[in-house]
């Protein structure tokens, strides 16, 4: 999971440099926003000349899932002091949530596992962004190397780690089928959102 983060972070730095973003702006994005999917979306919107309110609104919509992840982790982290909870929220990502959830399901306790993984991922992501900025001019088209698939591979890994029962497989495959069908039909902009909304409905129906 950490290795994939390095690949995706490097890709972000490369794409940001090639799209003409200011290096300090790019570094600040990784330090402050720290959300891969949202950062790539920001690059696309800036390149398309989107208005700032649209960029902000899109990022908030994409990152709204963090509210659900934070709520899920609250029973484990809710007793921490406010400053510690804010720090834990700052480094919360899909990857750290998935790894922490797996850890607690296996009987793990405490906050050390989550903190170690989340902070390591934050450090690697920002270092990888710097690497991408440095070598971006020499890479050319990153898609010819297949590294544009890295972020997809990350989410597939997260799903695989979360699968515990046969019903989990059904939900994952149904969501994947819906997202793929919409993407192939040319509706890629709503494919993930639609599949993400459908998956919990399917899970609830199966119960």
Image: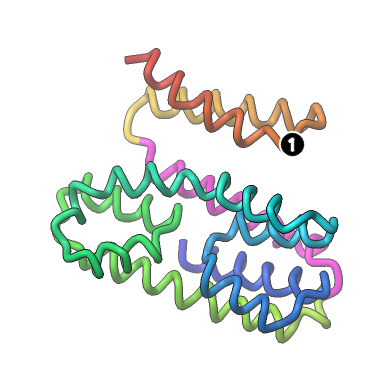
In front: 20, or 158?
20
- Percent of width and height locating residue 145: 77, 64
- Percent of width and height locating residue 132: 68, 78
- Percent of width and height locating residue 160: 44, 42
What residue is pinned by disc 1? 188
- Tell me what residue is drawn at x 54 percent, y 63 percent: 4
Q: Secondary structure at mark 1?
A: helix
Q: Is residue 134 above or below residue 2?
A: below
Residue 140, by quadrant, is: bottom right
Q: Is residue 154 above or below residue 85?
A: above
In the picture as drawn, the residue positioned furthest to the bottom comes out as: 134
Q: Is 143 a magenta residue?
A: yes
Q: Number of numbered discs present?
A: 1
Residue 164, by quadrant, is: top left
- Tell me what residue is drawn at x 64 percent, y 48 percent: 58
Horizontal arrangement in the rendering, residue 23 relative to residue 98 (left or right): right
Q: Is 56 a magenta residue?
A: no
Range shown magenta? 140-163
Q: Is residue 13 above or below residue 47?
A: below
Horizontal arrangement in the rendering, residue 142 relative to residue 196 (left or right): right
- Tell me what residue is drawn at x 61 percent, y 28 percent: 194
- Percent of width and height locating residue 180: 69, 31
């Amino acid at each position: 999971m950490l290795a994939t983060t390095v690949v995706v972070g490097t890709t972000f730095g490369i794409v940001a440099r090639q799209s003409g973003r200011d290096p300090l702006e790019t570094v600040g994005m990784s330090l402050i926003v720290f959300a891969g999917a949202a950062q790539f979306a920001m690059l696309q919107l800036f390149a398309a000349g989107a208005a700032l309110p649209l960029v902000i609104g899109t990022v908030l919509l994409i990152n709204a899932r963090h509210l659900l992840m934070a709520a899920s982790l609250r029973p484990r982290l809710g007793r921490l002091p406010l400053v510690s909870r804010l720090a834990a929220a700052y480094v919360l990502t899909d990857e750290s949530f998935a790894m922490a959830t797996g850890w607690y399901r296996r009987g793990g306790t405490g906050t050390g596992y989550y903190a170690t993984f989340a902070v390591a991922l934050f450090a690697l992501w920002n270092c990888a962004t710097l690497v991408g900025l440095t070598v971006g001019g020499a890479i050319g088209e990153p898609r010819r190397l297949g590294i544009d698939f890295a972020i997809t591979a990350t989410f597939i890994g997260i799903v695989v780690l979360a699968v515990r029962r046969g019903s989990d497989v059904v939900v994952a495959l149904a969501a994947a089928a819906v997202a793929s069908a919409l993407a192939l039909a040319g509706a890629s902009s709503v494919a993930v959102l639609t599949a993400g909304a459908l998956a919990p409905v399917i899970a609830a129906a199966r119960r």
